[in-house]
Image: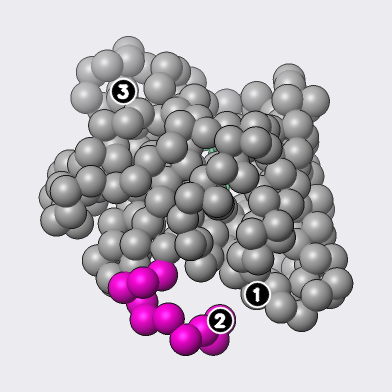
Amino acid sequence: MATSTSISERYVLVTGGAGYIGSHCTVSLLTAGYKVVIVDNLYNASYESIVRVARIAGVSSVPFHKVDLLDQRQLSAVFARYPIWAVVHLASAKAVGESVQRPLDYYHINVTGTINLLRAMKDAGVRNLVFSSSATVYGDPPIIPIPETSPLKPESPYGRTKVVIESLVRDLCDSDEGWNAALLRYFNPAGAHETGLMGENPKGVPYNLMPYLAQVAVGKREYLNVFGSDYETKDGTGIRWVNS
Ligand SMILES: O=c1ccn([C@@H]2O[C@H](COP(=O)(O)OP(=O)(O)O[C@H]3O[C@H](CO)[C@H](O)[C@H](O)[C@H]3O)[C@@H](O)[C@H]2O)c(=O)[nH]1
């Protein structure tokens, strides 16, 4: 990503910057000296997390725009307003089970939203991208630990949206060598910021295991349902007691 500007003049746009990974990522970017602009539709996150990001990073505020990636006009307006150098694209619908029930919504939000973002980037001449994919693209992998070369066999609509977007980004890079892109396939992130000011706190009932478990631990919810009935165990469930 060679460019003549210094880090302190580089604006990084973080989509989904109010979310769990986005808020931690924004703190790291600010601490490293980058300028950050956040877009987030606040569907599953709160503005409060951006206030805390600013507090942890020691800045007065972080530029924030409540924009949905499905709104091409508003998205382009953000690119017109800031000299953005790179985009970290985290905004996504991300629950495996929900994606099985709502495939159209998942493809629309994730794939169409990303197409809108990439178009806005292209129009603005921004071609540095970090895309938040997922380890879920490997499905049930034949080898563990999973080598990066493992076949891509996603088992849910959610996972398939990530593979589609990865392919799209590769095709874009093939079409124009000016694009620089990284596709990150991380597993299940967990934990809070060391200040205790920032953690995973989705709106409503969490769909993912860790935030749900955390809410049970603090007494906000009564119990955790352990999903699954066809594990290779005596009763097929993943539930085990200390003496069983
Ligand atoms: O209340 C719950 C919630 C989840 N689970 C189970 O816990 C495991 C983890 O579930 P998560 O939803 O937390 O995570 P997934 O591995 O299904 O998927 C998540 O991890 C992926 C990376 O591997 C992606 O990042 C994706 O966005 C994210 O949803 C799964 O077996 C799930 O069935 C339960 O038993 N009870």
Report the residue marked by disc 3: 216
Q: For residue 236, say whether it is visible.
A: no
* Residue 159 falls left or right of residue 240: right
Nearest to N terminus: mark 2 or mark 1: 2
Q: How far is mark 2 from mark 3, CA to CA? A: 44 Å
Judging depth in this view, the residue of 58 and 103 nearest the camera is: 58
- Residue positioned 32% across, 31% down in the render: 47
- Residue positioned 58% across, 36% down in the render: 74
Above or below, comparing residue 104 to residue 173 in the picture: above
- Which amino acid, mark 3? Val
Q: Which quadrant does ligand 1 occupy?
A: top right
Look at the numbered disc 2 and give the secondary structure of its residue. Answer: loop
* Residue density around tag 1, few if under 14, some if 14–19, many if 20 or more, within 10 Å: some
User: In the rendered structure, does residue 49 fall within the stretch colored magenta?
Assistant: no
* Residue density around tag 2, few if under 14, some if 14–19, many if 20 or more, within 10 Å: few
Cβ atoms under marks 2 and 1 closer than 8 Å: yes
Look at the numbered disc 1 and give the secondary structure of its residue. Answer: strand
Tell me the tag on residue 1.
2
Report the residue marked by disc 1: 180
* Residue density around tag 3, few if under 14, some if 14–19, many if 20 or more, within 10 Å: some
Q: Is mark 3 within 8 Å of ligand 1?
A: no
Q: Magenta part of the protein: which range?
A: 1-10
- Which amino acid, mark 1? Asn
Residue 88 in the image: state x and y as whole percent: 52, 58
* Residue 153 falls left or right of residue 197: right
